[in-house]
Amino acid sequence: MQILDGKALSEKITNQVSKEVKQLKEKSITPGLAVMLVGNDPASHAYVSMKAKACKKTGIYSIVHEMPEDISQEKILETISMMNKNPNINGILVQLPLPSHIDEEAVLGAIDPVKDVDGFHPCNVGKLVLGMDCFAPCTPLGVMKLLQEYQIDPKGLDACVVGASNIVGKPMMNLILNQFATVDICHIHTKDLKAHTSRADLLIVGVGKINLITADMVKDGAIVIDIGINRNSEGKLVGDVDFEHVKDKCSFITPVPGGVGPMTIAMLMQNTLKAAREEV
Ligand code: GUN
């Protein structure tokens, strides 16, 4: 069994981004990222602070628009419109989830697709489905980078994606399908989860449920990617996979923490650089 070390790879990518940002700055271009953070969700605050820190480390200019929980949708849309027009801002990210009175679709759809570094705008989602160059969502893109680093080719593999969210499961499905994996996608209404997971050569799980995947659900020699981030009763960070019991059955597995998590932020830096270079 080999660990897929997302921490090490994310540092390698972040160092490369830093170098490329420096080169851009020599041409008087400073990549800029605007982050919108609405409300008081502690996890969102933690993620946004990690994203701002990564910007600082790579030399990317960043600004965080913090907004109260009860802000109007109009005000959010106004801020997005301002950032769409701001030439110093190349990337715009709205941290999710948004408060329930806000229409998430309307907010994400208001971001200029060329600044949509999270890849949530319908235009980028459509391009991803068609296999066109686009901004792909950072977490599944980070998984693809990890697979590539360890020379794991999804082509022809029986893959199973557990979780069908717009920000993880669906784009993940499309990215590996574009690389010619045969993909099952499971969700809350799947009748027999184990029937799907246990035949997967490549099992990718992003649900947010501790120990959802136990050893009996995993094929011998499978590649297991755990996107879940949960806190257990002892306050420790754990994924969706019962790592201790599953690891010995796998050929490769991602740890939590130190697997997919750090890759998400590295991909955000890379997407912001791509936006500054006007590559999409
Ligand atoms: N909330 C949970 N994951 C993400 C993410 O990747 N991007 C944004 N914007 N919000 C999130």
Image: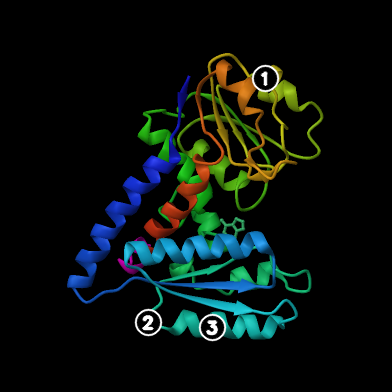
User: Which amino acid type corresponds to the residue marked 1 in the rendered image?
Assistant: Ala
15 relative to 9, above or below? below
Which residue, as the protein is rendered here, is positioned at the far top? Answer: 220
Is tag 2's residue or tag 1's residue first in the polypeptide sequence?
2
Q: Nearer the viewer, residue 106 or 217?
A: 217
Query: What range of the chain is rendered magenta?
Result: 273-280
Q: Nearer the viewer, residue 194 or 71?
A: 71
Q: Which mark is drawn over residue 81?
A: 3
Rendered-image quarter of ligand 1: bottom right
216 relative to 155, above or below? above
Q: Nearer the viewer, residue 199 or 215?
A: 215
- Horizontal and vertical percent position of residue 99: 74, 70
Q: What residue does disc 1 label?
A: 215
Q: Nearer the viewer, residue 23 or 262?
A: 262
Mark pair 1, 3: CA separation: 49 Å
Q: Is mark 2 within 8 Å of ligand 1?
A: no
Tell me the element at label 1.
Answer: helix
Mark pair 2, 1: CA separation: 51 Å
Name the front one of labels 2 and 1: 1
Q: What residue does disc 2 label?
A: 87
62 relative to 153, above or below? below
**Would residue 185 be counted in the magenta stretch?**
no
- Name the image quarter holding residue 185: top right
- Please say if the residues under marks 1 and 3 sit with CB atoms less than 8 Å apart: no
Q: Is mark 1 within 8 Å of ligand 1?
A: no
User: Which amino acid type corresponds to the residue marked 3 in the rendered image?
Assistant: Ser
